[in-house]
Image (cartoon, rainbow, N blue to C red):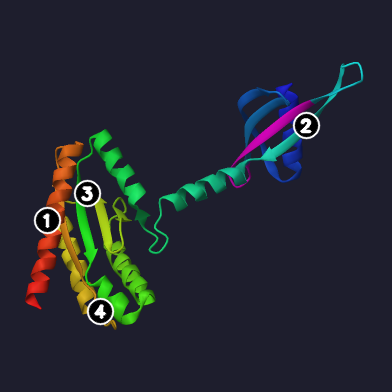
Amino acid sequence: KPELIEGSCVKHWQEEEYSAKVSLLRREEKPIGLNIIFNLINKKGENLTISSLRKALQNSEGKIIGYVYSFENLLEERREAATNYKNSITDELTGVFNRRHYRAMVGEYVQKGVQFSVAEIDCDDLKYVNDSFGHSTGDDYLQTVVNVIKGKMLPSEVLCRIGGDEFVMLSIKRTKEEMLAMLKSVNKFLCEMQLKYPASISFGAEYIESVDFEAYRKGIHSADKQLYSMKKTKHTER
């Protein structure tokens, strides 16, 4: 009976210094036996998901003479799944989100009708830094840019690396002008840093007011044009 299984498990986990708070989640009849999934809450307030499998013991005549219960803590499985998911949406080098998460966030904003600003950001002269100082220095350049941007971001804002030297930032709090002003301050900070390589960014931003994918495509195209216009101006001034 489920209550017997719960009671047995409660007694076991009490001995392991867990509280006796149990909530049944579901029961599943499987070919090998009855599987019962339930939650236990420990003294730290953490939720543990427990899987209890009941297997019948039969004698030579096929009569059930008892049951064997096995218990499995699914918390580690859940933690592993969460870690795998986090890794799947994170850029390994910089620690910010990747292109996959960027696309998911844009889809979520559009689906929910959320107005937002989008900025495209490029690290200037990354190829030159890589060729002149080595790829480890190029990696340091990217990480430096990310850290400076993150230092000026709001909690709700999202920064994603979508290519080698390309980043996208999403904000539901800032206007286009506020995004541009923030990135201008990032660029100024980078230019004034005492590094062995030149550091700066080019960027463009747009506010997506009419929330649909067509408006988003027009907005990202506008931000992209601003970015490359800035890059062109920098090259002309050299």
Examine the rendered structure and indicate whether residue 80 appears above or below residue 133.
above
Q: Return the residue nearer the eye: 86 or 52.
A: 86
Instruction: Tell us which disc is closer to us: 3 or 1.
Output: 1
The residue stretch that appears in magenta: 42-55
Instruction: Tell us which disc is closer to us: 3 or 4.
Output: 4
First along the sequence among labels 3 and 1 = 3
Q: Amino acid at mark 1?
A: Lys
First along the sequence among labels 2 and 3 = 2
Mark 3 → mark 4, Cα distance in angstroms: 28 Å
Q: Residues within 10 Å of mark 4 (few under 14, many from 20)?
A: few
- Which residue was labeled with disc 2? 69
Mark 2 → mark 3, Cα distance in angstroms: 53 Å
Examine the rendered structure and indicate whether residue 208 appears above or below residue 94.
above
Q: Quadrant of residue 147?
A: bottom left
- Which residue was labeled with disc 1? 225
Q: Assess whether mark 4 and mark 3 are in contact (beta carbons under 8 angstroms).
A: no
Examine the rendered structure and indicate whether residue 105 appears above or below residue 29.
below
Residue at 38%, 63% (x, y): give it. Answer: 94
Mark 3 → mark 1, Cα distance in angstroms: 23 Å
First along the sequence among labels 2 and 4 = 2
| Quadrant of the frame with the C terminus | bottom left
Residue at 26%, 55% (x, y): give it. Answer: 168
Residue at 74%, 21% (x, y): give it. Answer: 1
Q: Return the residue nearer the eye: 155 or 120.
A: 120
Q: Would you say residue 54 sits in the magenta stretch?
A: yes
Residue 15 place in picture, x, y as percent: 76, 43
First along the sequence among labels 4 and 1 = 4
- Which residue was labeled with disc 3? 173
